[in-house]
Amino acid sequence: MLRNQQWSKVKKRLDSFKCDSLKERLQFTVTNYRRAHDQLGRAYITVDKKEVINMCTITSETALNRRTYEIKREKHIPYNDWDEAHEWVLDEGIFAQYDFFDAVEEYFLLPIEESLKSNNMLIKIFALIDRRVGKRTLEKMKQSILCEKEIVQFFYTLRCKAEGIRLHG
C-alpha cells in the first residue's frame, strides 16, 4: 500500500509521469501533522506555486460526518451509510490525504486510457497532466471535458495551454 511507502519515492514516481510542459510548474506536496490523532495531514497540488487542490483530512472528515448525519436524517436510518457519504464528498471535490494516496495507487495500476475515463477526479487529473497523453488525445476531449467538474476542466485547460493547443475555434 502506498501510504506505507516513503513519500519521496511515491512523489518521484508521480513526478516521472508529468508532461514536460508542466514539469516545473506543477508540484505535489504531502504534509503530515504529528500532533493530529491519526498522524495524517493533507496533500495538495500547486501550479506556479499557487495551491489549486487541497486534500485535507480534517476538512474531508468534517464534510463526511456532516453528510453521514444528513443521510441518516433524510432516510430515517439509525446506522451510518459511510460509503454513500464518502461518494458524495468525493463528488463534491472534497478529498482527504488518504483519498489522494488511494487515487495515486489506483492511477499507478491503470492503463492511461482508463485513467482518463475514471470517475475519480484525482485520477483523471493525474492522467490529464501525464506525458503519455498526447495532443491528439487532448484535442479529442474538447467536448467531453465540458461535462467535467470545474477542477478537472482547470487541469485540462492548463495542459492544453502548456502544449499550445487552441481551446476555441
Image: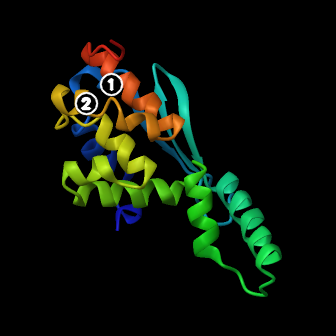
Element type at mark 2? helix
Element type at mark 1? helix
**Residue named by callout 2:** 138
Q: Residue at x 29, y 34 (%)?
A: 141
Q: Which image quadrant: the N terminus?
A: bottom left
Is 30 situated left or right of 78 in this image? left
Mark 2 vs mark 1: which is more N-terminal? 2
Vertically, is 50 above or below 100? above
| Foreground residue among 52 and 58 | 52
Q: Position of residue 93 (x, y in %)?
A: 57, 48
Using the rendered image of the protein, determine whether residue 30 is visible from the camera's viewpoint: yes
**Could you say which quadrant of the image residue 3 lies in?**
bottom left
Q: Residues within 10 Å of mark 1 (few under 14, many from 20)?
A: many
Q: Which image quadrant: the C terminus?
A: top left
Vertically, is 25 above or below 2? above
The number of discs equals: 2
Q: CA distance from mark 2 to mark 1?
A: 9 Å
| Foreground residue among 25 and 29 | 25
Q: Residue at x 56, y 54 (%)?
A: 91
Q: Position of residue 42 (x, y in %)?
A: 57, 48
**Could you say which quadrant of the image residue 105 lies in?**
bottom left
Vertically, is 72 above or below 61? below
| Foreground residue among 129 and 152 | 152
Is 125 situated left or right of 138 in this image? right
Q: Residues within 10 Å of mark 2 (few under 14, many from 20)?
A: some
**Residue named by callout 1:** 159
> Three-letter amino acid code at disc 2?
Leu
> Are circles 2 and 1 on residues that touch, CB within 8 Å?
yes
> Three-letter amino acid code at disc 1?
Arg
Is 57 situated left or right of 53 in this image? right
**Mark 2 or 1: the one toward you:** 2
Q: Residue at x 23, y 32 (%)?
A: 140
